[in-house]
Image (spheres, grey):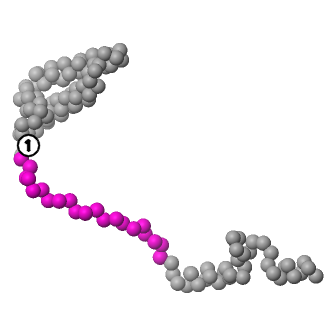
Amino acid sequence: MTKRLEAIKAVRDMGDDELHGHIRTQRSKLFELRFQMATGQVENHRQTREIRREIARAMTIDREHERGIVRVSEPPAIAAAAPAAPPRVRRRRAVAAVEPAEVAEAEKDVSLSEVEPGGEPGAGSSEDEMVDEDE
């Protein structure tokens, strides 16, 4: 049995009064550990995480007792050959459907003679305007 399962079993086997006392002692440990961290006396910083998780575990079991939820101490064994997850499918972005008539109208609006290289349609002067300026 793993360390985590042993801790869960130990907390589940406690009575209500023991459980409340356990939560109280864990909270005082956390309080002391925070002071030690502030003064730089802590060597293992993961202790805070472990204590917080222990408090959460005990509080969860306390709520289960309050609500009358009965849990088994050990979870059922997991089957060795679990089904594999389906492969991820890459989805393409949706492309807006454009009607052929709309494309034809857009092409009529912009003719190649109006577009200068590197410019926008209608920008700059056309050849007709250049001829008028020369005369």
Query: Viewed as shown, does residue 16 lie left or right of 114?
Result: left
Q: Amino acid at mark 1?
A: Pro
Q: Position of residue 92 (x, y in %)?
A: 39, 68
Question: Where 102 falls versus 20 (above or below)?
Answer: below
User: Can residue 2 be seen in this snapshot?
Assistant: yes
Main secondary structure along the magenta-highlighted residues? loop
Q: Which residue is more in the foreground, 109 or 127?
A: 127
Q: Residue at x 68, y 81 (%)?
A: 112
Q: Is residue 91 within the magenta segment?
A: yes
Q: Which residues are magenta?
A: 77-97
The answer to which quarter of the image holds residue 61 is top left
Query: Viewed as shown, does residue 35 lie left or right of 13?
Result: right
Question: Where 80 falls versus 71 (above or below)?
Answer: below
Q: Which residue is more in the foreground, 90 or 30?
A: 90
The answer to which quarter of the image holds residue 123 is bottom right
Q: Which residue is more in the foreground, 24 or 111?
A: 111
Q: Return the residue at label 1.
A: 75
Q: Which residue is more in the foreground, 73 or 125?
A: 125
Query: Viewed as shown, does residue 46 lie left or right of 82?
Result: right
Which secondary structure, mark 1? loop
Q: Position of residue 90 (x, y in %)?
A: 34, 65
Q: Position of residue 103 (x, y in %)?
A: 56, 81
Q: Position of residue 110 (x, y in %)?
A: 67, 79
Q: Residue at x 89, y 81 (%)?
A: 132
Question: Where 80 falls versus 2 (above or below)?
Answer: below
